[in-house]
């Protein structure tokens, strides 16, 4: 398989470490649809051919497991839906699915709108010209929404501590990546101690939610109730404490980190494309005005949806998914031994000029029905595909639309001059060092003019 030139011993380790998305993109640009990278003695095979993508993720999915890269994630998520395999995964997926069906997601719209309205009030209180870390703001908002919708708990108080602890643990996970030697947490280095303390903070929040519900006896029929009531069909046993913790941690983490990245990149892109801000506002004014959105409103916000889709094309929050075959397989005419790491990168697929002309250009109209017609199914993959496709895709789109629509109407977010924004690709694709922006409260300037006249 074509292999770009790399270092003699470490191969492409450094290049992938420093900038994985770019390294993979350039590898495919120069070598075609199948590219082999090397980490020392290991191979990492990146696929861009859409037939191969379909085979690995969808039609032959049972021949693959998630790869070693997910091992580090288990430090935080244990054996939850994202990281588990086989019968356990199947059972948990079946059990969690009802909470993500379209009707359930529609019932969350009000809470999503209410949390966004609260954030808007807080922003207004900060005043015109205030400087914000928009990424931090989006993380806190999406965490609060996950809390309110999936476990009926307002995590507002915990949000900052939880967010900080989560950043510490994710930073660690991103650092160790797929390197099993690096994940030796018991060595008492300062970084390891900090990571373990942060994990304890996260555990305490999750355990607190579970204990509170146990004491209450029953809840409002939310996801947590479903998980607690679930019984194994054969043994009649419920989930033990550890399993419940892993599942809840998974949904809380997977359910807000990704969506907040999608929103942060959207604000960043919009700050460079005022014409789309105008179009968004025109649509929101017409459909929504000042009301909290209903599911019917959200269905009408077509340009808003296109902006979000295009933002996830340019900056896919999960920029690569990985698998490894549990037996030798043949892909694209190449034989891959059992255990080969296989990468499928939405970042790469979304920049394939064959399906996305002028791929670096932000152009939400790519997603109009006319221009989408004929585009192959797997050319766009922000939520993955096949049996392990994101369970929360509908939830995420509903939420992101509600948030974007409500905030864009009331605020402008301007880039702070001189701030360079870079990608930080780990398990997710985040803006490195956050995203500092200046808040402009719409109508504030006019209001000030009027008061000076008065
Ligand atoms: C813009 C937001 C989101 C993006 C881009 C995203 C992306 C993804 C992707 C690409 C996968 C597949 C990973 C793989 O195949 O290896 C995935 C899986 C998953 N996502 Fe999301 N996700 C988002 C939001 C959410 C939300 C809101 C939730 C829950 C509330 C969620 C929960 C999960 C879970 C539990 C899985 C594992 C599913 C399984 O393996 O059965 N995600 N997500």
Image (tube, rainbow, N blue to C red):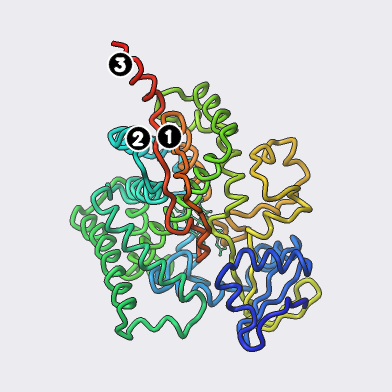
Classify 10 Å Cα crowding around label 3: few (below 14), some (14-19), many (20 and above). Answer: few
Residue 452 is tagged as: 3
Q: Which residue is drawn at 61% across and 44% down?
A: 310
Across and down, in percent, residue 96 comes to 44, 56
Q: In which quarter of the image is the C terminus?
A: top left
SS assignment at label 2? helix
Q: How far apart are marks 1 and 2 (CA)?
A: 7 Å
Whether residue 236 is visible? no
Q: Is residue 228 above or below residue 176?
A: above
Residue nearest the observer in this picture, 62 or 206: 206
* Mark number displayed over residue 204: none
Please tell me how crowded label 1 is: few (under 14), some (14-19), or many (20+) other residues with Cα within 10 Å. some
Element marked by disc 1 = helix
Residue at 31 percent across and 33 percent down: it is 127
Local SS, label 3: helix
Q: Nearer the viewer, residue 412 or 333?
A: 412
The residue at 45%/30% (across/down) is 294
Residue position for label 1: 407
CA gap, disc 3 and disc 1: 27 Å
Query: Is the residue under label 2 in contact with that under label 1 (CB below 8 Å)?
Result: yes
Quarter of the figure with residue 347: bottom right
Residue 246 higher or lower than 273, as above or below: below
Q: Nearer the viewer, residue 439 or 248?
A: 439
Which residue lies under the disc numbered 2? Answer: 120
Q: Which of marks 2 and 3 is nearer the N terminus?
A: 2
**Nearer the observer, disc 2 or disc 3?**
3
Report the front residue among 243 and 294: 294
In the image, 285: left or right of 107? Answer: right
Which of pointers 3 and 1 indicates the residue nearer the eye?
Answer: 3
- Residue 130 sits in quarter: top left
Q: Is mark 2 within 8 Å of ligand 1?
A: no
The N terminus lies in which quarter of the figure? bottom right
């Amino acid at each position: 398989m074509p292999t770009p030139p790399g270092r003699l011993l470490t191969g492409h380790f450094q290049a992938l470490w420093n900038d994985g998305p770019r390294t993979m993109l350039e590898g495919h640009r120069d070598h075609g649809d199948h590219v082999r990278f090397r980490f020392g003695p290991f191979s990492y095979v990146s696929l861009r051919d859409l037939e191969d993508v379909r085979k690995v993720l969808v039609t032959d999915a049972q021949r693959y497991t998630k790869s070693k890269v997910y091992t580090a994630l288990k430090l935080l998520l244990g054996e939850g839906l994202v990281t588990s395999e086989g019968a356990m995964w199947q059972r948990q997926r079946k059990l969690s699915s009802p909470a993500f069906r379209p009707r359930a997601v529609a019932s969350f719209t009000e809470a999503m709108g209410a949390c966004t309205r609260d954030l808007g009030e807080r922003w207004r209180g900060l005043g015109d010209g205030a400087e914000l870390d928009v990424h931090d703001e989006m993380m806190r908002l999406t965490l609060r929404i996950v809390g309110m919708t999936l476990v009926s708990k307002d995590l507002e108080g915990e949000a900052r501590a939880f967010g900080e602890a989560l950043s510490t643990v994710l930073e660690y996970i991103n650092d160790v990546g797929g390197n099993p030697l690096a994940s030796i947490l018991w060595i008492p280095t300062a970084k390891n101690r900090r990571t373990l303390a942060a994990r304890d903070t996260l555990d305490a929040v999750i355990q607190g939610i579970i204990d509170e519900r146990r004491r209450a006896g029953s809840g409002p029929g939310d996801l947590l109730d479903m998980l607690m009531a679930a019984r194994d069909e054969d043994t009649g046993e419920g989930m033990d404490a550890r399993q419940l913790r892993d599942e809840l941690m998974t949904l809380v983490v997977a359910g807000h980190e990704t969506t907040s990245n999608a929103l942060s990149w959207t604000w960043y892109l919009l700050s460079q494309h005022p014409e789309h801000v105008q179009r968004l506002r025109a649509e929101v004014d017409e459909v929504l005005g000042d009301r909290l959105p209903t599911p019917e409103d959200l269905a009408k916000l077509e340009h808003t949806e296109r902006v979000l889709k295009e933002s996830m094309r340019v900056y896919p929050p999960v920029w690569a998914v990985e698998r490894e075959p549990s037996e030798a397989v043949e892909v694209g005419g190449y034989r891959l031994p059992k255990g080969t790491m296989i990468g499928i990168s939405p970042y790469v697929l979304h920049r394939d000029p064959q399906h996305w002309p002028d791929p670096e250009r932000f152009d939400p109209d790519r997603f109009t029905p006319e221009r989408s017609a004929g585009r192959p199914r797997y050319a766009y993959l922000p939520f993955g595909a096949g049996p392990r496709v994101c369970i929360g895709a509908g939830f995420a789109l509903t939420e992101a639309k509600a948030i974007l629509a409500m905030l864009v109407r009331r605020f402008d977010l301007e880039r702070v001059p001189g701030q360079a924004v870079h990608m930080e690709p780990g398990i997710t694709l985040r803006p490195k060092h956050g995203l500092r922006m200046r808040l402009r409260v719409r109508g504030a300037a006019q209001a000030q003019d009027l008061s000076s006249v008065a």
